[in-house]
Image (cartoon, rainbow, N blue to C red):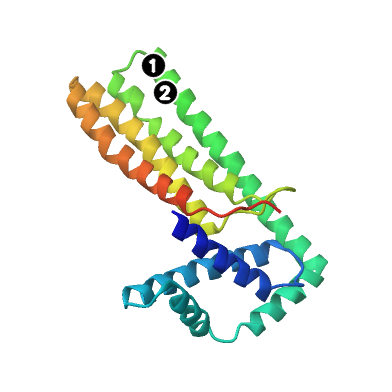
Amino acid sequence: MKRNRSLDDKVRNYLNRLFAGVGESQQLFDLKEELTINLKEKIRDYEKHGMGEEEAFKEAISSMGDLSGLVDDMREVGKDSAREAVYTSMAERISTAGLIVGILIILFGILTMAMLYFMEVPLVSVTGPGIFIVIGGAILTYSFLARETKNKYAMNKIRATLYALAVGLILFSLYTATSSGVATGEMFIAISSFMVFFIAGVGVFLGLIFTGSNRNK
């Protein structure tokens, strides 16, 4: 753990020096996060070939080539407040639409299940619309994390997608456990169905937590 913090500090300090004087923006945050991932992957690859951490770090930086063009591009973005405003506004509208759609899909699933329950149809049929709660939960998670706020930058789209996948798997584990348990009447089948997707979802979730970066502005 200490070694990981040391490496994180080295990569973060290097990128902060590289982009020193560049105005903060969502695009710069996304670029730094992408470069951080690439650098760490290269460092790990070099270490697997027998290099020490410091040597691997220097070799990884060298392999990235000349990044002055990226620095200049980000400097222009930082200066262009109009372009940044358009980018932020568009991303916010998309995120808001996703939040609304996610909530509506979840409500549709809940209300449909309630309607079927009071229609006194078989419980297997009642659990069916629960899949909409799974889908809505995943959409809601992605849209929330990909939303920029006054205090936080939006999360990288890939990481936001993985978080949505983790939440979707956990919700799906509850859905399959309920539906299979009701259909078979066997608790061990419900638990086995739940276990597979729940463990996978928690695994993805923990991996993201342990590799997360600070999004505070």
Q: Which residue is labeled 2 in the image?
A: 113
Q: Is residue 101 above or below residue 207?
A: above
Residue with the mark numbered 1: 117
Instruction: Classify residue 82 as left or right of residue 171.
Output: right
Work out whether 154 lies above or below 38. Answer: above
The picture places residue 17, in percent across and down from the top left corner, at 67, 73
Residue 163 falls left or right of residue 204: right
Q: Quadrant of residue 41?
A: bottom left
What crowding class fits label 1: few (fewer than 14 Cα within 10 Å), some (14-19), or many (20 or more)? Answer: some
- Disc 2 element: helix
What is the C-alpha distance between the residues marked 1 and 2? Answer: 6 Å
Q: Which secondary structure lies at badge 1?
A: helix
Q: Is residue 211 above or below residue 105?
A: below
Q: Identify which residue is drawn at 50% across, 55% down.
A: 159
Image spot of residue 114 (x, y percent): 44, 19
Residue sitting at the far bottom: 66
Q: Amino acid at mark 2?
A: Met
| CB atoms of marks 1 and 2 within 8 Å | yes
| Relative depth, front residue between 157 and 120 | 157
